[in-house]
Amino acid sequence: MEFRQSSKLTGVCYEIRGPVVDRANELEAAGHRVLRLNIGNPAAFGFAAPAAILDEMVRRLPTAHGYSDSRGIRPAREALVARYTARGVADLDADDVYLGNGVSELAGMAIQALVDTGDQVLVPSPDYPLWTAVTRLAGGTAVHYRCDESNGWQPDLDDIAARITDRTRAIVVINPNNPTGAVYSRELLEGIADLARRHNLMILADEVYDRIVFEGEHHHIAALAPDVLCLTMSGLSKSHRVAGFRAGWLVVSGPRQHARDYLEGLTMLAGMRLCPNSPAQFVVEAALADTSLDALVAPGGRLREQRDAAWRALNAIPGVSCVKPAAALYAFPQLDPEVHPIRDDERFVLDLLLAEKIHVVQGTGFNWPDPDHFRIVTLPEADELTAAITTIGRFLQGYRQ
Ligand code: PLP
Protein backbone atom coordinates (compact mmCIF):
# COMPACT_ATOMS: atom_id res chain seq x y z
CA MET A 1 0.00 0.00 0.00
CA GLU A 2 1.20 3.44 -0.85
CA PHE A 3 1.50 5.99 1.94
CA ARG A 4 0.05 9.28 0.80
CA GLN A 5 0.23 12.67 2.44
CA SER A 6 -2.83 13.68 4.35
CA SER A 7 -5.56 15.72 2.71
CA LYS A 8 -4.73 18.44 5.22
CA LEU A 9 -1.69 19.23 3.09
CA THR A 10 -3.71 19.86 -0.07
CA GLY A 11 -2.96 23.39 -1.21
CA VAL A 12 -0.19 23.90 1.33
CA CYS A 13 2.88 25.32 -0.46
CA TYR A 14 6.27 26.49 0.68
CA GLU A 15 8.37 27.10 -2.41
CA ILE A 16 11.38 28.57 -0.60
CA ARG A 17 12.21 24.98 0.33
CA GLY A 18 10.23 23.56 -2.63
CA PRO A 19 10.99 21.14 -5.49
CA VAL A 20 13.59 23.36 -7.19
CA VAL A 21 15.68 22.88 -4.04
CA ASP A 22 15.96 19.17 -4.88
CA ARG A 23 17.46 20.08 -8.27
CA ALA A 24 19.88 22.48 -6.60
CA ASN A 25 20.93 19.69 -4.24
CA GLU A 26 21.44 17.31 -7.18
CA LEU A 27 23.60 19.89 -8.95
CA GLU A 28 25.74 20.30 -5.85
CA ALA A 29 26.03 16.55 -5.44
CA ALA A 30 27.27 16.42 -9.04
CA GLY A 31 30.05 18.87 -8.14
CA HIS A 32 28.54 22.22 -9.23
CA ARG A 33 28.65 25.29 -7.05
CA VAL A 34 25.13 26.67 -6.65
CA LEU A 35 24.59 30.23 -5.48
CA ARG A 36 21.70 29.85 -3.06
CA LEU A 37 19.78 33.08 -3.27
CA ASN A 38 16.59 31.35 -2.25
CA ILE A 39 16.76 31.48 1.53
CA GLY A 40 17.66 34.20 4.01
CA ASN A 41 20.30 32.30 5.94
CA PRO A 42 23.01 34.80 6.98
CA ALA A 43 25.43 32.09 8.18
CA ALA A 44 25.64 30.64 4.67
CA PHE A 45 27.13 33.93 3.45
CA GLY A 46 29.87 34.33 6.02
CA PHE A 47 27.96 36.28 8.64
CA ALA A 48 29.37 35.21 12.00
CA ALA A 49 27.20 34.90 15.07
CA PRO A 50 27.86 37.78 17.48
CA ALA A 51 30.61 36.84 19.97
CA ALA A 52 28.45 37.88 22.92
CA ILE A 53 25.80 35.34 21.89
CA LEU A 54 28.26 32.50 21.34
CA ASP A 55 30.04 33.20 24.63
CA GLU A 56 26.74 33.16 26.47
CA MET A 57 25.67 29.93 24.77
CA VAL A 58 28.94 28.24 25.78
CA ARG A 59 28.69 29.57 29.34
CA ARG A 60 25.09 28.46 29.80
CA LEU A 61 25.14 25.17 27.91
CA PRO A 62 26.20 22.97 30.86
CA THR A 63 22.99 23.88 32.68
CA ALA A 64 20.68 24.27 29.69
CA HIS A 65 19.93 20.63 29.03
CA GLY A 66 16.61 20.26 30.81
CA TYR A 67 13.09 21.09 29.65
CA SER A 68 12.17 24.64 30.57
CA ASP A 69 8.80 26.17 31.34
CA SER A 70 6.76 25.59 28.20
CA ARG A 71 6.56 29.35 27.55
CA GLY A 72 10.31 29.61 27.96
CA ILE A 73 12.66 30.70 30.74
CA ARG A 74 11.46 33.65 32.77
CA PRO A 75 14.57 35.91 32.54
CA ALA A 76 14.36 35.87 28.76
CA ARG A 77 10.65 36.65 28.82
CA GLU A 78 11.26 39.48 31.30
CA ALA A 79 13.99 40.90 29.08
CA LEU A 80 11.53 40.88 26.18
CA VAL A 81 8.90 42.65 28.30
CA ALA A 82 11.50 45.35 29.02
CA ARG A 83 12.38 45.68 25.34
CA TYR A 84 8.82 46.02 24.07
CA THR A 85 7.78 48.26 26.96
CA ALA A 86 10.68 50.60 26.15
CA ARG A 87 9.45 50.64 22.56
CA GLY A 88 5.93 51.68 23.47
CA VAL A 89 3.98 48.44 23.88
CA ALA A 90 1.85 48.93 27.01
CA ASP A 91 0.87 46.73 29.90
CA LEU A 92 3.06 43.66 29.37
CA ASP A 93 3.93 40.88 31.78
CA ALA A 94 6.31 37.94 31.40
CA ASP A 95 3.29 35.64 31.05
CA ASP A 96 2.35 37.49 27.86
CA VAL A 97 5.53 36.19 26.24
CA TYR A 98 5.99 32.78 24.63
CA LEU A 99 9.40 31.70 23.43
CA GLY A 100 9.48 29.38 20.45
CA ASN A 101 11.62 27.55 17.94
CA GLY A 102 11.67 30.56 15.65
CA VAL A 103 8.78 32.65 14.39
CA SER A 104 7.95 29.67 12.17
CA GLU A 105 6.79 27.53 15.06
CA LEU A 106 4.99 30.36 16.82
CA ALA A 107 3.13 31.40 13.66
CA GLY A 108 1.82 27.86 13.33
CA MET A 109 0.74 27.80 16.97
CA ALA A 110 -0.93 31.22 16.80
CA ILE A 111 -2.98 30.22 13.76
CA GLN A 112 -3.70 26.68 14.90
CA ALA A 113 -5.16 27.97 18.15
CA LEU A 114 -7.39 30.48 16.32
CA VAL A 115 -8.64 29.11 13.05
CA ASP A 116 -11.58 26.77 12.50
CA THR A 117 -12.44 25.20 9.16
CA GLY A 118 -13.68 27.94 6.86
CA ASP A 119 -12.31 30.82 8.92
CA GLN A 120 -10.44 33.47 7.00
CA VAL A 121 -7.14 35.16 7.70
CA LEU A 122 -6.05 38.25 5.80
CA VAL A 123 -2.53 37.74 4.50
CA PRO A 124 -0.50 40.11 2.31
CA SER A 125 0.24 39.42 -1.34
CA PRO A 126 3.09 39.00 -1.84
CA ASP A 127 3.56 37.24 1.50
CA TYR A 128 6.12 35.25 3.37
CA PRO A 129 4.42 31.98 2.37
CA LEU A 130 4.57 30.43 5.81
CA TRP A 131 1.47 32.44 6.79
CA THR A 132 -0.63 31.14 3.93
CA ALA A 133 0.65 27.62 4.52
CA VAL A 134 -0.13 27.51 8.25
CA THR A 135 -3.58 29.00 7.65
CA ARG A 136 -4.41 26.30 5.08
CA LEU A 137 -2.98 23.59 7.32
CA ALA A 138 -5.32 24.76 10.08
CA GLY A 139 -8.32 24.38 7.72
CA GLY A 140 -8.68 28.10 7.15
CA THR A 141 -8.57 30.24 4.04
CA ALA A 142 -5.83 32.78 3.49
CA VAL A 143 -7.44 35.78 1.85
CA HIS A 144 -4.72 37.80 0.17
CA TYR A 145 -4.77 41.57 0.30
CA ARG A 146 -2.83 43.59 -2.24
CA CYS A 147 0.40 45.37 -1.51
CA ASP A 148 0.87 48.14 -4.05
CA GLU A 149 4.16 48.05 -5.92
CA SER A 150 3.55 51.54 -7.33
CA ASN A 151 3.27 52.82 -3.76
CA GLY A 152 6.49 51.29 -2.41
CA TRP A 153 4.68 48.00 -1.75
CA GLN A 154 2.54 49.49 1.03
CA PRO A 155 -0.64 47.46 1.64
CA ASP A 156 -3.78 48.90 0.06
CA LEU A 157 -6.16 49.70 2.93
CA ASP A 158 -9.24 49.81 0.69
CA ASP A 159 -8.40 46.39 -0.67
CA ILE A 160 -8.01 45.03 2.87
CA ALA A 161 -11.34 46.54 3.93
CA ALA A 162 -13.10 45.08 0.89
CA ARG A 163 -11.94 41.57 1.78
CA ILE A 164 -13.23 41.50 5.36
CA THR A 165 -16.18 39.15 5.89
CA ASP A 166 -17.95 37.71 8.89
CA ARG A 167 -15.52 34.77 8.72
CA THR A 168 -12.39 36.95 8.99
CA ARG A 169 -10.57 36.29 12.26
CA ALA A 170 -7.19 37.95 11.94
CA ILE A 171 -4.94 40.09 9.80
CA VAL A 172 -1.29 39.23 9.25
CA VAL A 173 1.04 42.23 9.00
CA ILE A 174 4.60 41.45 7.90
CA ASN A 175 6.57 44.60 8.69
CA PRO A 176 9.31 45.03 7.57
CA ASN A 177 8.20 42.86 4.73
CA ASN A 178 9.64 39.78 3.14
CA PRO A 179 9.78 39.61 0.10
CA THR A 180 9.37 43.32 -0.73
CA GLY A 181 11.60 44.98 1.89
CA ALA A 182 8.88 47.58 2.58
CA VAL A 183 8.67 49.33 5.95
CA TYR A 184 5.12 50.41 6.70
CA SER A 185 4.31 53.99 7.61
CA ARG A 186 2.78 54.91 10.92
CA GLU A 187 -0.39 56.13 9.16
CA LEU A 188 -0.78 52.85 7.32
CA LEU A 189 -0.34 50.80 10.50
CA GLU A 190 -2.90 53.01 12.23
CA GLY A 191 -5.26 52.37 9.32
CA ILE A 192 -4.79 48.60 9.66
CA ALA A 193 -5.29 48.86 13.43
CA ASP A 194 -8.48 50.79 12.83
CA LEU A 195 -9.85 48.07 10.55
CA ALA A 196 -8.92 45.42 13.13
CA ARG A 197 -10.62 47.43 15.87
CA ARG A 198 -13.83 47.94 13.87
CA HIS A 199 -14.11 44.34 12.73
CA ASN A 200 -12.83 42.58 15.86
CA LEU A 201 -9.79 41.09 14.17
CA MET A 202 -6.69 39.85 15.91
CA ILE A 203 -3.46 41.37 14.57
CA LEU A 204 -0.66 38.91 13.87
CA ALA A 205 2.46 41.03 13.47
CA ASP A 206 5.49 39.29 11.99
CA GLU A 207 8.34 41.66 12.77
CA VAL A 208 11.33 39.36 12.43
CA TYR A 209 13.17 42.11 10.44
CA ASP A 210 12.32 44.96 12.81
CA ARG A 211 15.97 45.89 13.37
CA ILE A 212 17.24 45.44 9.79
CA VAL A 213 15.99 48.81 8.56
CA PHE A 214 17.95 50.98 6.11
CA GLU A 215 15.46 53.79 5.53
CA GLY A 216 12.45 54.94 7.49
CA GLU A 217 11.42 54.03 11.00
CA HIS A 218 9.95 50.78 12.16
CA HIS A 219 6.84 51.05 14.34
CA HIS A 220 5.44 48.13 16.30
CA ILE A 221 1.78 47.97 15.38
CA ALA A 222 1.14 46.73 18.94
CA ALA A 223 2.36 50.11 20.25
CA LEU A 224 -0.06 51.95 17.96
CA ALA A 225 -3.02 49.73 18.84
CA PRO A 226 -3.08 49.19 22.63
CA ASP A 227 -6.81 48.46 22.41
CA VAL A 228 -6.49 45.65 19.84
CA LEU A 229 -5.35 42.11 20.57
CA CYS A 230 -1.93 41.85 18.94
CA LEU A 231 0.46 38.95 18.74
CA THR A 232 3.88 40.35 17.87
CA MET A 233 6.48 37.85 16.69
CA SER A 234 10.20 38.19 16.18
CA GLY A 235 13.43 36.40 16.99
CA LEU A 236 17.17 36.13 16.61
CA SER A 237 17.38 34.38 13.22
CA LYS A 238 17.99 37.43 11.05
CA SER A 239 18.97 40.42 13.17
CA HIS A 240 21.38 38.31 15.22
CA ARG A 241 22.41 36.01 12.36
CA VAL A 242 21.74 32.79 14.32
CA ALA A 243 18.90 31.30 12.27
CA GLY A 244 19.87 27.75 13.20
CA PHE A 245 19.50 28.37 16.92
CA ARG A 246 15.71 28.55 16.37
CA ALA A 247 15.16 31.34 18.86
CA GLY A 248 11.96 33.34 18.49
CA TRP A 249 9.22 34.89 20.59
CA LEU A 250 5.60 35.91 20.56
CA VAL A 251 4.31 38.80 22.68
CA VAL A 252 0.60 39.16 23.43
CA SER A 253 -0.66 42.71 23.95
CA GLY A 254 -3.95 44.55 24.03
CA PRO A 255 -7.20 43.51 25.74
CA ARG A 256 -6.68 39.95 26.97
CA GLN A 257 -9.95 39.64 28.90
CA HIS A 258 -11.85 38.75 25.70
CA ALA A 259 -9.15 36.32 24.65
CA ARG A 260 -8.80 34.09 27.69
CA ASP A 261 -10.06 31.02 25.89
CA TYR A 262 -7.79 31.62 22.89
CA LEU A 263 -4.78 32.19 25.12
CA GLU A 264 -5.54 29.01 27.03
CA GLY A 265 -5.41 27.20 23.69
CA LEU A 266 -2.13 28.87 22.77
CA THR A 267 -0.65 27.92 26.13
CA MET A 268 -1.81 24.34 25.63
CA LEU A 269 -0.08 24.21 22.24
CA ALA A 270 3.06 25.61 23.86
CA GLY A 271 2.82 22.84 26.45
CA MET A 272 2.33 20.13 23.84
CA ARG A 273 5.78 20.82 22.41
CA LEU A 274 7.03 20.75 26.03
CA CYS A 275 9.35 23.70 25.53
CA PRO A 276 11.40 25.46 22.87
CA ASN A 277 15.06 24.58 22.35
CA SER A 278 16.57 25.36 25.76
CA PRO A 279 20.16 26.48 24.96
CA ALA A 280 18.85 29.15 22.59
CA GLN A 281 16.59 30.60 25.26
CA PHE A 282 19.58 31.33 27.46
CA VAL A 283 21.10 33.71 24.90
CA VAL A 284 18.02 35.87 24.35
CA GLU A 285 18.90 38.33 27.12
CA ALA A 286 22.48 38.79 25.90
CA ALA A 287 21.26 39.07 22.31
CA LEU A 288 18.84 41.87 23.14
CA ALA A 289 21.79 43.89 24.48
CA ASP A 290 23.99 43.14 21.47
CA THR A 291 24.44 46.02 19.04
CA SER A 292 26.67 44.37 16.45
CA LEU A 293 23.93 44.62 13.82
CA ASP A 294 24.08 48.41 13.79
CA ALA A 295 27.39 48.53 11.89
CA LEU A 296 26.03 46.16 9.23
CA VAL A 297 22.98 48.33 8.60
CA ALA A 298 24.62 51.79 8.84
CA PRO A 299 25.91 53.61 5.74
CA GLY A 300 28.95 51.68 4.53
CA GLY A 301 27.79 48.58 6.43
CA ARG A 302 27.81 45.24 4.69
CA LEU A 303 24.05 44.62 4.61
CA ARG A 304 23.31 48.10 3.31
CA GLU A 305 26.04 47.94 0.66
CA GLN A 306 24.66 44.63 -0.55
CA ARG A 307 21.13 45.96 -0.66
CA ASP A 308 22.36 48.95 -2.70
CA ALA A 309 24.39 46.75 -5.06
CA ALA A 310 21.45 44.40 -5.67
CA TRP A 311 19.02 47.22 -6.29
CA ARG A 312 21.37 48.97 -8.73
CA ALA A 313 22.23 45.81 -10.64
CA LEU A 314 18.61 44.71 -10.91
CA ASN A 315 17.48 48.05 -12.28
CA ALA A 316 20.33 47.98 -14.81
CA ILE A 317 18.79 44.92 -16.52
CA PRO A 318 16.58 45.93 -19.46
CA GLY A 319 12.96 45.07 -18.70
CA VAL A 320 13.57 44.63 -14.96
CA SER A 321 12.58 47.13 -12.29
CA CYS A 322 12.87 46.91 -8.56
CA VAL A 323 11.45 49.05 -5.77
CA LYS A 324 14.29 49.88 -3.40
CA PRO A 325 13.95 47.61 -0.37
CA ALA A 326 14.01 49.83 2.73
CA ALA A 327 14.65 46.89 5.05
CA ALA A 328 15.24 43.15 5.46
CA LEU A 329 17.41 40.89 3.29
CA TYR A 330 15.62 40.62 -0.07
CA ALA A 331 14.72 42.32 -3.33
CA PHE A 332 11.55 41.54 -5.28
CA PRO A 333 12.09 42.74 -8.87
CA GLN A 334 9.47 42.86 -11.57
CA LEU A 335 10.02 41.39 -15.04
CA ASP A 336 8.25 43.60 -17.57
CA PRO A 337 5.93 41.15 -19.39
CA GLU A 338 6.40 43.07 -22.65
CA VAL A 339 10.14 42.43 -22.54
CA HIS A 340 10.21 39.11 -20.66
CA PRO A 341 6.97 37.27 -21.41
CA ILE A 342 7.21 34.56 -18.77
CA ARG A 343 4.16 32.38 -18.33
CA ASP A 344 5.53 29.91 -15.78
CA ASP A 345 7.83 31.53 -13.26
CA GLU A 346 8.72 28.26 -11.53
CA ARG A 347 9.98 27.03 -14.91
CA PHE A 348 11.99 30.26 -15.26
CA VAL A 349 13.59 29.72 -11.85
CA LEU A 350 14.42 26.12 -12.70
CA ASP A 351 15.87 27.06 -16.11
CA LEU A 352 17.99 29.76 -14.47
CA LEU A 353 19.24 27.26 -11.91
CA LEU A 354 20.14 24.65 -14.51
CA ALA A 355 21.84 27.14 -16.83
CA GLU A 356 23.61 29.45 -14.39
CA LYS A 357 23.58 27.60 -11.05
CA ILE A 358 21.83 30.52 -9.41
CA HIS A 359 18.83 29.69 -7.26
CA VAL A 360 16.15 32.39 -6.75
CA VAL A 361 12.47 31.95 -5.88
CA GLN A 362 9.57 32.66 -8.23
CA GLY A 363 7.15 35.43 -7.28
CA THR A 364 4.17 33.09 -7.31
CA GLY A 365 5.91 31.23 -4.46
CA PHE A 366 5.01 34.29 -2.36
CA ASN A 367 1.36 34.12 -3.35
CA TRP A 368 1.82 36.88 -5.91
CA PRO A 369 -0.83 36.26 -8.59
CA ASP A 370 1.25 36.85 -11.75
CA PRO A 371 4.40 35.11 -13.03
CA ASP A 372 6.28 38.41 -13.35
CA HIS A 373 8.44 38.69 -10.22
CA PHE A 374 11.16 36.79 -8.47
CA ARG A 375 12.84 37.17 -5.12
CA ILE A 376 16.54 37.37 -4.58
CA VAL A 377 18.37 37.25 -1.25
CA THR A 378 20.78 40.15 -0.75
CA LEU A 379 23.17 38.30 1.56
CA PRO A 380 26.24 37.63 -0.65
CA GLU A 381 29.05 40.20 -0.69
CA ALA A 382 28.26 43.14 -2.99
CA ASP A 383 30.67 42.06 -5.77
CA GLU A 384 29.33 38.54 -5.89
CA LEU A 385 25.76 39.79 -5.82
CA THR A 386 26.41 42.24 -8.66
CA ALA A 387 28.07 39.51 -10.72
CA ALA A 388 25.18 37.10 -10.08
CA ILE A 389 22.53 39.66 -11.02
CA THR A 390 24.48 40.58 -14.16
CA THR A 391 24.44 36.88 -15.05
CA ILE A 392 20.68 36.76 -14.46
CA GLY A 393 20.35 39.76 -16.83
CA ARG A 394 22.37 37.99 -19.51
CA PHE A 395 20.30 34.84 -19.06
CA LEU A 396 17.07 36.82 -19.36
CA GLN A 397 18.23 38.39 -22.63
CA GLY A 398 18.23 35.08 -24.41
CA TYR A 399 15.39 33.47 -22.46
CA ARG A 400 12.06 32.66 -24.07
CA GLN A 401 9.32 30.38 -22.81
N1 PLP B 1 8.82 35.57 9.08
C1 PLP B 1 9.42 36.08 7.99
C2 PLP B 1 8.82 37.29 7.36
C3 PLP B 1 10.57 35.49 7.48
O1 PLP B 1 11.15 36.00 6.39
C4 PLP B 1 11.10 34.34 8.11
C5 PLP B 1 12.27 33.65 7.56
O2 PLP B 1 12.77 33.93 6.51
C6 PLP B 1 10.44 33.85 9.23
C7 PLP B 1 9.31 34.50 9.69
C8 PLP B 1 10.93 32.63 9.96
O3 PLP B 1 11.88 32.99 10.88
P1 PLP B 1 12.37 32.00 12.04
O4 PLP B 1 13.77 31.63 11.70
O5 PLP B 1 12.29 32.87 13.27
O6 PLP B 1 11.46 30.85 12.10
Image: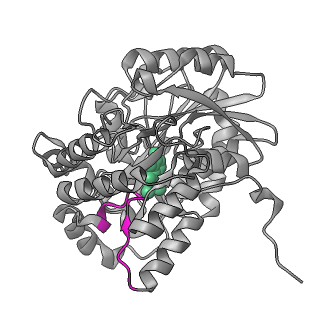
**What secondary structure characterizes most of the magenta part?**
loop
The part of the image, by quadrant, that contains residue 70 is bottom right
Q: Is residue 246 above or below residue 137?
A: below
> Is residue 132 rendered to the left or right of residue 236?
right
Please provide percent x and percent y for residue 226.
47, 21
- Pick whichever, 372 or 252, lies toward us: 372
Which percent across, then down, holds residue 330?
36, 46
- Res 22 → quadrant: bottom right
The correct choice, above or below, for 370 with respect to 361 in the image is above
Question: Which is more toward the observer, 375 or 120?
Answer: 375
- Residue at 46% x, 16% y: name it: 190
- Looking at the image, can residue 34 be seen? yes
Q: How is the image coloured?
A: one colour
- Residue 295, given in percent of the width and then of the height, sits at 13, 47
- Say whether residue 236 is visible: no
Residue 39 counted in the magenta span: yes
Where is the N terminus found, in terms of image quarters?
Answer: bottom right
Judged from this view, the residue extending furthest toward the right is: 1
Residue at 31% x, 60% y is 42
Task: Please determine whether, in this image, residue 316 is positioned above or below residue 276.
Answer: above
- Tell me the residue at 17%/49% (across/down): 296
Q: What residue range appears in magenta?
A: 31-44
